[in-house]
Image (cartoon, helix red, strand yellow):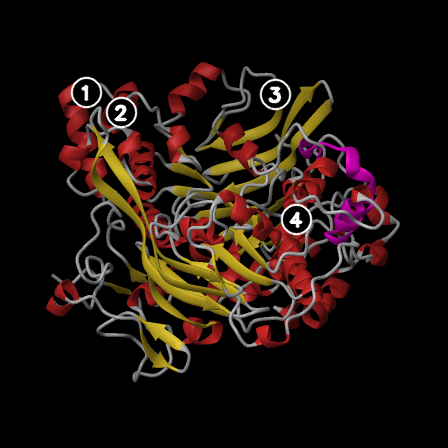
Amino acid sequence: MNRPVEQWASMVPVDDYAPTAFLDVRDLRIHFPTDDGLVKSVDGLSFTLERGRTLGIVGESGSGKSVTSLGILGLHKGQHARVSGQVWLDGEELVAASPEHVRRLRGKKMAMIFQDPLSALHPFYSIGDQIVEAYRVHNEVSKKQARTHAIDMLGRVGIPRPSERVDDYPHQFSGGMRQRAMIAMALSCDPELLIADEPTTALDVTVQAQILDLVRDLQAEFNSAVMIITHDLGVVAELADDILVMYAGKAVEQGSAREVFTAAEHPYTWGLLSSMPRLDRDRQDRLVPIAGSPPSLINVPEGCAFHPRCRFCELSAPLSLTEVPVMTETTPGHGVACHLEPAQRRRLWTEEVQPLL
Amino acid sequence: MTVSDVSPRPADAGAAQTPLLEVTGLTKHFPITRGVRRRQVGAVKAVDGIDFTVARGETLGLVGESGCGKTTTGRMLTRLEEPTGGRIIFDGRDITHLSTARMRPLRREVQMVFQDPYSSLNPRHTVGTIVGAPFRLQKVQTEHGTKRAVQDLLELVGLNPEHYNRYPHEFSGGQRQRIGIARALALRPKLIVADEPVSALDVSIQAQVINLLEDLQGEFGLTYVVIAHDLSVVRHIADRVAVMYLGHIVEIGPRQGVYERPQHPYTVALLSAVPVPDVTRRDNRERIRLQGDPPSPIDPPPACPFHTRCWKAQEVCRTVTPPLVEMAPGQRAACHFPENAPDGPYEPGTDSIVAPAS
């Protein structure tokens, strides 16, 4: 993720240079006009992703992470959403492209694994039918060939006796198997970009481990770019090469997984790390939660959206109350959007946050 | 924080020694019927003979994956389900088969906090009505009136007492969970069964609610049974942990023992599967990959329930049910070939895939 410093800023002119990365998102904004006001779900997001690498997008409810993934897939096109910015996928720009064009790319070039397979899969059609349909939309093959391919995919994702189970309905699979079936469907057309939105939240921990291993293996096999969206820092640590932390529709921290975990720079990231009970550390007497709750996306706080919940707000006041912080690079490849001085941040991290982790 | 005016019941001098909850051979089989006459053709053996005790003031964590029977166990403890076998002794009284009328006064002492903060509160009632319902249903008079008692409770759990007249949909998930906790606390119960109290909440809110539960336990001397699948949360909050698999308790013991020196292979696999937020451990983590899915509780495997997925299974595991035996002080496991008993502490090593022994 080695971008020149000026590319971090969310207000940079977006069409000044050709995209170099496989997936290049620039100043993406997705706003929904509603009766209560404009919901700014995604408000100036920029990041890149290469094939063969995994990006973990971390955030809680209302951070805009799911809307981001749906936006990249073009699923907000033609709806009431106002989408601006650019999404470059393998040299093609998608935001300005027609819905028809993007629809042809979905499934083939980019695919998605949803959070709850029971609601994402059609209950009236067998798993085999659903995979066959997806495959035949993008490939000129006979039904028989498509069915063979479907059985092959089910076998690849670890479903036992695939030739028998291909005709089963989603409700006849267990949770883990359903998720595998959805992965089979997503991968049936060899997509180059795979987006997984909370793929294991609904699953038991041993099944989660199997699914994460599967995604990792399949990524190595297909050399796909993987975007995994989750609130679980453990999952992100397992899978992601790079991490992007989102809060209230904006990116607050970006960097390699190693950097973000060992030298996090944003108070929100610190809050996430401190508030999780961890199996790999000594048990603390008390967790350190982040005060308050995530903000409404209609009434995002002035200035830094995180300031009402930030423990260190006074140290950067009054700037944090009036000006939106801009993403700036602190160490190579590591960016943060915060008004605190870099030296101050590092001191706080080493003295106050890290010892408690 | 002001404390509600419900008069505390006098402490029983000898009660400090006896456990608050004693469960023996607890069983719940749900019948499967077929045909017009609904004759029973099988049973879902949700809980299949479990024993445990909970001391006063302690927190027992009940962990396991979907289908292991932990939620059914919790519902039996609060008598939302009636056991089909075994006994539950609460505070010296056998409550296993008490009638609804007999059970009613006991509901002051045993309360439940539910998993889903969205469906566990009646959307047509105000918060004041919801939290005040226990007073009304149990016909409890308070010194300054129910409204005042409810407002005190709201403040206790960190909510604004002025929101007395708001409806559940006006609150966030974390706040609704606090409302559920306030309702459970209203009559100062002795035991609270919390079924996945934080799993539906965001990470930063989870920490707030966990801290709240701990503070309340200290302040009111509560006893908790916390049912959860999140092992990190249970490790933080529980004093003792019971691991369930397919309706059985496979391991039970003090938190530190179970987490640091797990004895049952299933516990070992469960702990190794939890993703830890440490990037440096990614490459050299021992991960035990269990093959396949858990068997159905309609047709559980004979003898040891875990033998179909266990990498150490031998012939004896298929024929002789392992008893729950003490392998380390206070820690019991049901296994013929336990881990960690003589082999030393559990440590991460190289990655290994293990298939069930056949």
Label 4 is found on which chain of the structure? A
The kind of residue tagged 4 is Val
The kind of residue tagged 3 is Ala
| A162 displayed left or right of A15 | left
Labels 3 and 1: the sequence-earlier one: 3
Q: Residue at x 32, y 71 (%)?
A: B333
Q: Is disc 4 in the same subunit as disc 2?
A: yes
Labels 3 and 2: the sequence-earlier one: 3
Instruction: Provide the major secondary structure of the magenta segment.
Output: helix
Q: Is disc 3 in the same subunit as disc 2?
A: yes
Label 3 is found on which chain of the structure? A
Rounded to the nearest whole Å, what is the CA distance between mark 3 and mark 2?
29 Å
Give me the disc on residue A141.
1
Q: Which residue is mark 3?
A: A81
Answer yes or no: is residue A10 visible.
no
**In the image, residue B283 lies at what x, y percent?**
38, 65
Q: Is disc 3 in the same subunit as disc 4?
A: yes
CB contact under 8 Å: marks 3 and 2 = no
Residue B138: quarter of image: top right
The range drawn in magenta is B148-170
CB contact under 8 Å: marks 1 and 2 = yes
Labels 1 and 2: the sequence-earlier one: 2
Q: Tag count in the figure?
A: 4
In what element is the residue under mark 4? helix
In the displayed structure, B350 sits above or below A177; it is below
